[in-house]
Image: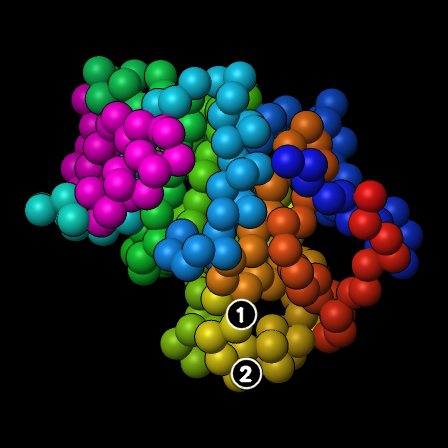
Amino acid sequence: MPCPILLFNSTPDPLYTLDARRNKITALVMYSDQVIAENQKVDAVLLDLMAARGRAVGYITSGPEPDRRFFREKEAYYDRLGLSLTVFFDTQRRPQEAELNLLFDCDAIHLPGGDTRAFLKQLRDCDLLAHLADWAKRGGLLIGASAGAIMMTPTVALDAVFTDEDPLAVNSGRSLGLVPFEFFPHLNKSSYYLPKLLSYSERSQNRIAACRDGDGLVINDGQVCCVGDIVWIENGAVVEALAVV
């Protein structure tokens, strides 16, 4: 399934066509959610990317999972796609080297939804954040849903919109920083979200990709591809696409 590449009215910007020579990231898949049937179009692009890699997907917890309930939900999700969730990686404790090797031997790694800021803290506490970023920059495929997709960006500040806080007051530090824009999922869940994002963008240097459930973004070979109707925001306004190719 071809992935559309956006061109914008503004001056060509590396936010949208990443220099693949400087950004060695092979692939990222950013879902708003993985619940509704409309995600099948994002799934199709993911399967295209996985075709040359394999079927094994590792799972990193975003919070305590003593019963592995969320893991089993994702296990069923990926099984329906013909993929296999093979590794459960618990961020509640520091990993052993053998556990890290198992995780990074996977063909892709899934970052789930949850409490975004708590997830970031856990990745730091178990000393995984830098390892994960390095793995992705060396060609690993990361799949993020909701909080997991936010984690791929420079900051998790936009998580504050969900709790009616000021994103600029969030002092969680840098996240994975694999793309130079911010990501906001679940845009369709409230009419309140878009005005808050527009206001924040007037005070932030980062462009924002706002995503409705069922849509997503794919980073592949240095290009940012939109799957569905992504709303791009910058300097207090929606940035209109010039063309889709």
Question: In front here: 245 or 147?
Answer: 245
Q: CA distance from mark 2 to mark 1?
A: 8 Å
- The residue positioned 51% from the left and 21% from the top of the image is 51
What's the magenta region? Answer: 70-96
Q: Is residue 90 magenta?
A: yes
- Residue labelled with disc 1: 187
* Quadrant of the frame with the N terminus: top right
Q: Which mark is residue 191?
A: 2
Residue 195 coordinates in the image, percent (x, y): 62, 81
Q: Can residue 43 be seen in the rendering of this structure?
A: yes
Q: Is residue 68 magenta?
A: no
Above or below 101: residue 134: below
Q: Can residue 130 be seen in the rendering of this structure?
A: no
Specify whether 222 is left or right of 93: right
Give the tally of numbered discs: 2
Displayed quadrant of residue 210: bottom right
Question: In front here: 201 or 58?
Answer: 58
Q: Secondary structure at mark 1?
A: helix
The local crowd at label 1, few if under 14, some if 14 to 19, many if 20 or more residues have their Cα within 10 Å, is some
Residue 188 coordinates in the image, percent (x, y): 52, 72
Residue type pointed to by label 1? Leu
Q: Secondary structure at mark 2?
A: loop
Specify whether 181 is left or right of 161: right
Question: In front here: 81 or 200?
Answer: 81
